[in-house]
Amino acid sequence: MPTADRDVHPKIRLLETASRLFYAEGIHAVGVERLVSEAAVTRATFYRHYPTKDDLVAAYLSTTSERIRAGVGAVTQGKPAREALLAALGIIGDRTLDDDFRGCQFLNAAAEYPDRAHQVRQVIDDHRNWFFGVLRDLARDAGHADPEHAARTLVLLRDGALHGGNLDDPETVRTTLARAVADVAG
C-alpha cells in the first residue's frame, strides 16, 4: 500500500488515491474506509470534501477527462485535420501498451453505473460527447463526406480498442486500431 504524502492537500490526496484504486480495482470494489485509510485522512475530512462517494467518483472522472482533453489537444494542435485525427486515436492505441492498462475509465465506470440519469453517467456522457465532437470536427475539416458517421465509427473503434487491449495482444490492438482509423479517415 502506497503511503500518503501528508504535504499534499487532503482533497487532492483523496482524489489521487481514488483515481489509483478505482482504476485498478473498480469503483464499487473500493469502500470509503479503504479510501480514507490509504489517503491518510479522516472520514470527516472525506465527507467535507466529497459529500458522497459518488461525488468523489464524479471528480475522478472529471479529472480524468481534463487530462485526456489536454493530451488530445497536445497531440492534435497545429496538425492538418487528417493527421490530427490519426494522432487523437493513436494515443489510445499507445495507452493499451502501458503495463498498468485496465481499459477505459469511462467504460469501466459506465458498467458500474447503469442509470443514465446518475451524476456519474452525466460526467461519462459529457466526456464521450466532447470526444465525439472532436472527432466529428476533425473529420469535417479533413473533408470526410459524412463526418457524423465517421466520428461515430471512430468512437466505436476507440471503445473496442480500449476493451480489446485487456483481452488481446495490446500491440495487435494498437496496430489494428491505427489501420482502421486510417481506413475511416480516408
Image (tube, rainbow, N blue to C red):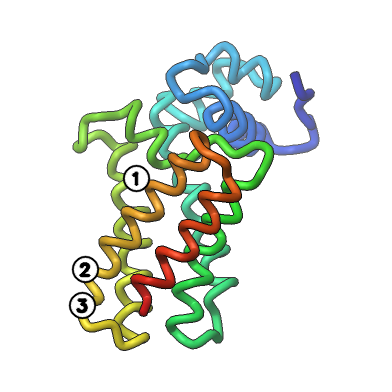
Q: Quadrant of residue 152?
A: bottom left
Quadrant for the N terminus, please: top right
Q: Secondary structure at mark 1?
A: helix
Q: Secondary structure at mark 2?
A: helix
How would you rate the neighbour count of disc 2 (Cα within 10 Å): few for under 14, some for 14-19, many for 20 or more? some
Label 3 and label 1: CA atoms lie apart by 25 Å
Lower sequence index among marks 3 and 1: 1
| Residue displayed at 58% across by 72% down | 75
The CA distance from mark 3 to mark 2 is 6 Å
- Relative to residue 119, is residue 32 drawn left or right? right
Q: Is residue 181 above or below residue 14?
A: below
Residue contact at pointers 3 and 2, CB within 8 angstroms: yes
x and y percent of residue 8 in the render? 74, 38
x, y (%) of residue 179?
Answer: 46, 65
Q: Is residue 67 above or below residue 151?
A: above
The residue at which mark 1 appears reads as 124
Query: Mark 1 is on which residue type?
Result: Ile
**Label 2 sits on residue:** 149
- The picture places residue 70, in percent across and down from the top left corner, at 55, 64
Q: Quadrant of residue 5?
A: top right
